[in-house]
Image (cartoon, grey):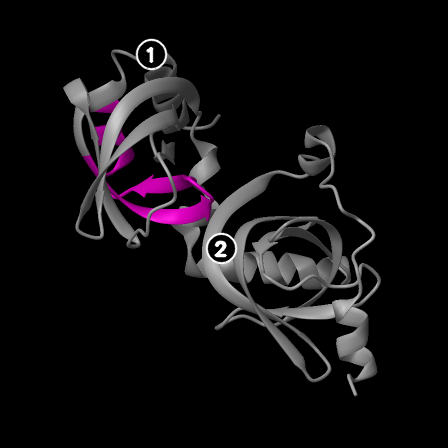
């Protein structure tokens, strides 16, 4: 017989649709791509944490969870935090924090201390583009389209959903090659963090995308 905890977690989730875009962005989100797990009683559910904000996290997991069930989200090297599932769309789910504000703050600071480059990616202005490109990863060469780019990284769409390593090279015609690492993935789209420093990225694309250059130079000016 299934335990009460497992039964509750296996129930159909009443929140079938994710929140609307304006609801999702109530708190700024930072892209991450780390392995985690949800625990509740005897049950452990592996998951991938895709992004995080002051309100909660977005994950990918195969097993739905009852919306009113409290779980603990655990990421190796960090203290666990209590969450509840707020929405689900296939294998994607939004978890809201169900912990005191000081606990949430400590959790976010812990993540930022370990992966500051990931947590700060969105400080750079992103410009929407539609650039044909190639991605080299896992011994493959794949056609791709760059959807947006910043001094820190890019959002890329592939044809299909091939396997990828955590490191890849993005090749964009006249701009040349960009070495990077994958920080999140959603189907055939993924986020890449550039390994070169921002000034080198700006030197490559700044003439074509002057807003990226202006944003980078503004951030380098000392605050008054």
Q: Which of marks 1 and 2 is nearer the N terminus?
A: 2
**Gap in Å between the C-alphas at discs 1 and 2?**
29 Å
Q: Position of residue 164 (x, y in %)?
A: 30, 51
SS state under label 1: helix
Please identify the quarter of the rendering in which residue 214 is found.
top left
Q: In this view, does 205 lie to the left or right of 16?
A: left
Residue in the picture at 77% in, 61% down: 98
Q: In this view, does 103 lie above or below 125?
A: below
Tell me the number on the disc at residue 73: none
* Residue drawn 41% across the image and 41% down it: 190
From what the image shows, is residue 13 above or below residue 73?
above
Q: Which residue lies furthest to the bottom in this view?
A: 1
The circle drawn on residue 112 is: 2
Q: 65 or 34, which lies in front? A: 65
Residue that numbered label 1 is attached to: 210
Which residue is painted at 68% across and 59% down in the image? Answer: 104
Circles 1 and 2: CB distance less than 8 Å? Answer: no
Q: Position of residue 207 (x, y in %)?
A: 25, 11
Callout 2: SS: helix
**The magenta stretch spans which residues?**
178-203
């Amino acid at each position: 017989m299934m335990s009460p905890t497992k039964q509750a977690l296996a129930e159909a989730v009443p929140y079938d649709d994710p929140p609307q875009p304006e609801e999702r962005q109530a708190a700024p989100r930072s892209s991450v791509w780390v392995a985690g797990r949800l625990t509740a009683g005897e049950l452990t559910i592996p998951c991938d944490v895709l992004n995080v904000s002051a309100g909660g996290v977005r994950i990918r997991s195969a097993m739905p969870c009852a919306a009113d069930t409290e779980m603990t989200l655990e990421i190796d090297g960090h203290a666990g935090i209590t969450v509840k599932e707020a929405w689900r769309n296939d294998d994607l789910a939004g978890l809201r924090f169900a912990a005191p504000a000081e606990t949430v703050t400590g959790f976010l600071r812990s993540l930022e201390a370990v992966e500051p480059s990931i947590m700060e990616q969105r400080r750079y202005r992103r410009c929407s583009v539609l650039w044909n490109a190639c991605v080299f990863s896992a011994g493959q060469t794949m056609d791709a389209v760059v959807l947006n780019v910043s001094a820190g990284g890019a959002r890329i769409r592939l044809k299909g959903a091939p396997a990828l390593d955590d490191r890849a090279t993005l090749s964009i015609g006249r701009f040349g090659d960009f070495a990077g690492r994958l920080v999140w993935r959603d189907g055939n789209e993924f986020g890449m963090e550039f390994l070169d420093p921002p000034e080198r990225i700006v030197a490559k694309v700044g003439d074509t995308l002057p807003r990226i250059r202006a944003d980078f130079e503004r951030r380098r000016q000392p605050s008054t």
